[in-house]
Amino acid sequence: MPSPFIALSGIDYAIGPKPILSGIDLTLERGRIYGLVGPNGSGKSTLLKIIARQIAPKSGAIAFGGKPAADWGAREFARHVAYMPQFTPATDGMTVRELIALGRFPWHGTLGRFTATDRRMVEEAIVRTELEDFADRLAANMSGGERQRAWIAMMLAQDARCLLLDEPTSALDLAHQASVLSLVQELSHERGLTVVIVLHDINLAARYCDAIIALNRGRITAEGTPTEIMQADKLRSIFGVGMGVFPHPVRNEPVSYLL
């Protein structure tokens, strides 16, 4: 059985008097991909930021590997958890290899030397994400799909045990969406990584995630396998519109559509 890596209990978050998240309880296991889905404004990105320690919850507890979040130092945490925001920072003047090398920062720090181990981890990440032909190009000149692969490579070089991805496919065409999510799926299962992905497309979540967590108005409204979530009544309760479901003609997984 997979062992839990992240545990959230009673997480609340608000901006002023407006509640954003209420009573979030979650246990996320190693080696599994979790898709966070739900309508706009449901709290998906906020929840991911709380897990990534980008923002602090108003109340509740979070533990990583059985240890309370407050007991993790910043560098130790960065060695275990990698976060890719929805809008990644600019990379002007930086090559793909230099971008990926930033993933080693938690291991050597600002004044630390870039060691042979660091170089090996960077080159392995480049190869694993099939970016050899792009390694010496400027990251800013890459296509959206290639750039997302470079950020994932940086997370691999970081050697984190948990990847947190906020809408990594939102600006990509279908081919690049499949490429990026297939890579994440392979890496999770190969390395036993805990992966949490915010996705707008429920069909992508059903195709690439082991479990789906649905939020609406700041609360978890459904949680389960793709087969358990991809049912007409549950989809209507999650998204507020009529939806149908049919089996994929090749893979037999559930596929949803608007009525």
Image (tube, rainbow, N blue to C red):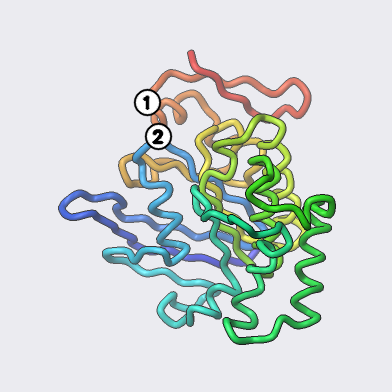
Please name the residue shown 55% across and 73% down the image: 78
Disc 2 residue type?
Pro
Location of residue 208 (image quadrant): top right
Q: Quadrant of residue 108?
A: bottom right
| Residue 35 percent coordinates (x, y) | 55, 45
Q: Is residue 57 left or right of residue 54?
A: left
Residue 160 in sight = no
- Assess whether mark 1 and mark 2 are in contact (beta carbons under 8 angstroms): yes
Q: CA distance from mark 2 to mark 1?
A: 9 Å
Q: Which mark is residue 164?
A: none
Q: Earlier in the sequence, mark 2 or mark 1?
A: 2
Q: Position of residue 93 (x, y in %)?
A: 63, 58
Label 2 or label 1, whichever lies nearer to me, is 2
Which residue carries the number 1 mark?
240
Rendering coords of residue 259 (x, y %): 48, 13
- Vertical comparison of 87 with 118: above or below: above
Instruction: Give the residue displayed 40% in from the left and 58% down from the top.
Output: 25
**Amino acid at pointer 1:** Gly
Return the residue at label 2.
Answer: 39
Residue at 75% in and 51% down? 186
**Helix, strand or loop status at disc 1:** loop
Frontmost residue, 40 versus 205: 40
Task: Where is residue 118? Give x, y as percent.
Answer: 74, 76
Query: Relative to the observer, which residue lies in front, 125 or 21?
Result: 125
Counting other residues with Cα less than 10 Å from the Cα at mark 1, is it few (<14), some (14-19), or many (20 or more)? few
Depicted 184 relative to depicted 29: above or below: above
